[in-house]
Image (cartoon, rainbow, N blue to C red):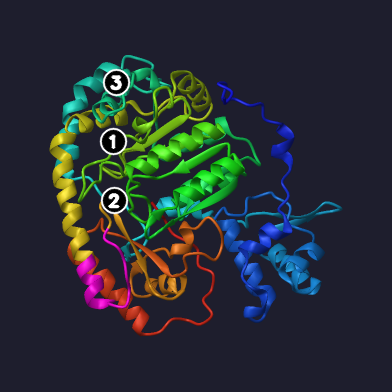
């Protein structure tokens, strides 16, 4: 039986060990024998990884001899790489303590630039998030104005979330088949915030976390920044291999497991009910905390919306299941409202942790979320019909302009996981920018370097005409030829 107390003391020394292993870094870098001069190619790749956050700031890079061995190149090449990194501001040396990563003056991490949004007129296919109709927003703001005025006379701090919003979210879970009390709900600033809180409380550096491969890039980034060791289980065109999931839980015994069973991002797959039961049972036996991401659960296009994952657990079997969700995919990403459902005692501990970062969410946003949730029965059906029409338009455009590409029509969600037939996704994404299309290659959704280079995630969250034009431009870019030696590209916003 797992220890009912989820909190484990964190050795602060773990957080001060800021060295990057040579094999770990080598696995993230391209083959140095592939281009010339190799040292410039490697330095450019490392600087891109630093900007993207995949290599943290202020960590010690491997010793030159160790990295040279791991890369199967000469020490002189690695020396030249480090020299170039220091010259460009991406590293600095400390006498007797090695070379450490840094950020040059004037450069901004990609995590920030993605949030700033595009500064050009490119069609943006990197964001799988719909907009909110203007009239819907205007009406909701008018509706909540009197309620907001009432709250103006209070301090406005609600670490757990507005009581009425917690109650509404709990009722929503209950209505979907999982009896829930408001005390089991914590309102957060989006699902990503919820995940970060959970990782910070229930894990420590070096802990193992089971994840799907591919998976949501921002979630993977949060795990990397928490210095967790990801153990991946595959999600293929046919779905999850539950035997691998069960054996991973049994043999690895991860502290946490992060899953997206409802219209999985990026594949769009839906985990069958009997497989959910097996995952819950295996996680209970291993004492692993399940973190279930349900941000896409309401976006059921061809099937009924699935009940909560935890509702399939045996009686008393939901004690180590945390469910996170948000309104970003169903309503609007600009409404930074998410939530998590967990045992009441854990919710209290997580609320205590969130006070150290933001003390409580915006009252205005929470009142707006409450008003929109109350109208979900009216707002969601037309949104789903819009997604169906846009999905049809995207599929038709791909059939017309890129018949050599293949995909499966997902039963829900917001995107197609397209197989290009050859490992050209990063090169095509870079080339597509010249044709006015912003998109990310499949490798960005991978848990390990070098995977899914034959895949593109293409969202159908823009109007049909825009989708047709975007596919036409990408097909033209491909027909005009891709660079054989593509430079490392700074990734853009992915949602």
How busy is the neighbourhood of tag 3: few (under 14 within 10 Å), some, or many (20 plus)? some
Find out whether residue 401 is within the magenta segment.
Answer: yes
145 shown above or below 135 = above
Query: Where, by quadrant of the figure, is residue 476 drawn?
Result: bottom left
User: At x 32% / y 73%, what residue is drawn?
Assistant: 405
Find out whether residue 51 is within the magenta segment.
Answer: no
User: At x 44% / y 59%, what residue is drawn?
Assistant: 492
Q: Are marks 3 and 1 in contact (CB under 8 Å)?
A: no
State the image coordinates of residue 186 (x, y, percent, origin top left): 40, 25
Q: Which residue is mark 3?
A: 167
Task: Please tell me which of labels 2 and 3 falls first in the chain.
Answer: 3
375 shown above or below 466 = above
- Residue mark closest to the camera, 2 vs 1: 1
Task: Please tell me which of labels 2 and 1 falls first in the chain.
Answer: 1
User: At x 47% / y 81%, what residue is drawn?
Assistant: 483
What stretch of residues is rendered in magenta?
Answer: 395-409
Task: Please tell me which of labels 3 and 1 falls first in the chain.
Answer: 3
Which part of the image, by quadrant, shows the N terminus?
Answer: top right
Q: Which residue is mark 2?
A: 413
**430 and 296: which is toward the camera:** 296
Q: Which residue is mark 1?
A: 307
**387 and 238: which is toward the camera:** 238
State the image coordinates of residue 297 (x, y, percent, origin top left): 30, 42
464 shown above or below 321 = below
């Amino acid at each position: 039986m797992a220890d009912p107390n989820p909190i484990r003391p964190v050795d602060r020394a773990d957080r001060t060990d800021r060295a990057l292993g040579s094999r770990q870094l080598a696995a993230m870098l391209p083959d140095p024998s592939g281009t010339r001069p190799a040292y410039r190619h490697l330095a450019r790749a490392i600087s891109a990884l630093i900007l993207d956050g995949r290599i943290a700031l202020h960590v010690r890079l491997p010793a030159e001899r160790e990295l040279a061995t791991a890369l199967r190149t000469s020490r002189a090449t690695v020396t030249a790489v480090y020299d170039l990194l220091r010259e460009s501001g991406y590293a600095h040396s400390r006498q007797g303590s090695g070379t450490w990563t840094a950020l040059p003056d004037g450069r901004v991490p990609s995590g920030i630039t993605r949030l700033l949004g595009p500064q050009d007129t490119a069609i943006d296919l990197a964001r799988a998030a719909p907009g909110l109709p203007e009239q819907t927003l205007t009406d909701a703001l008018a509706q909540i104005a009197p309620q907001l005025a009432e709250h103006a006379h209070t301090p406005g701090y609600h670490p757990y979330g507005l009581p009425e919003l917690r109650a509404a979210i709990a009722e929503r879970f209950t209505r979907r088949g999982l009896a829930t009390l408001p005390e089991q709900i914590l309102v957060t600033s989006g699902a990503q915030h919820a995940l970060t809180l959970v990782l910070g409380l229930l894990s420590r550096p070096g802990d193992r976390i089971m994840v799907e491969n591919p998976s949501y890039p921002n979630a993977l980034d949060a795990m990397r920044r928490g210095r967790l060791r990801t153990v991946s289980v595959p999600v293929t065109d046919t779905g999850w291999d539950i035997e691998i999931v069960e054996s991973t839980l049994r043999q690895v015994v991860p502290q946490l497991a992060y899953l997206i069973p409802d219209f999985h991002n990026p594949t769009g797959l839906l985990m069958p009910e009997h497989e959910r039961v097996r995952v819950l049972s295996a996680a209970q036996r291993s004492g692993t905390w399940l973190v279930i991401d349900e941000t896409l659960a309401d976006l059921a296009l061809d099937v009924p919306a699935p009940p909560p994952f935890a509702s399939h657990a045996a009686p008393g079997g939901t004690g180590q299941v945390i469910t996170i969700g948000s309104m970003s995919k169903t309503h609007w990403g600009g409404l930074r409202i998410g939530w998590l459902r967990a045992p009441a005692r854990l919710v209290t501990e997580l609320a205590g942790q969130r006070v150290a970062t933001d003390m409580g969410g915006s009252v205005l946003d929470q009142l707006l979320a409450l008003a929109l949730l109350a109208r979900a029965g009216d707002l969601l059906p037309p949104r789903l019909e819009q997604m169906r029409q846009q999905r049809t338009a995207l599929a038709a455009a791909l059939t017309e302009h890129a018949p050599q590409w293949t995909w499966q029509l997902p039963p829900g969600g917001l995107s197609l996981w397209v197989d290009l037939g050859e490992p050209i996704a990063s090169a095509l994404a870079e080339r597509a920018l010249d044709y006015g299309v912003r998109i990310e290659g499949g490798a960005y959704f991978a848990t390990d370097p070098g995977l899914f280079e034959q895949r593109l995630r293409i969202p159908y969250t823009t109007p049909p005409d825009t989708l047709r034009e975007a596919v036409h431009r990408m097909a033209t870019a491909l027909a005009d030829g891709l660079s054989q030696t593509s430079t490392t590209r700074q990734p853009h916003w992915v949602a």
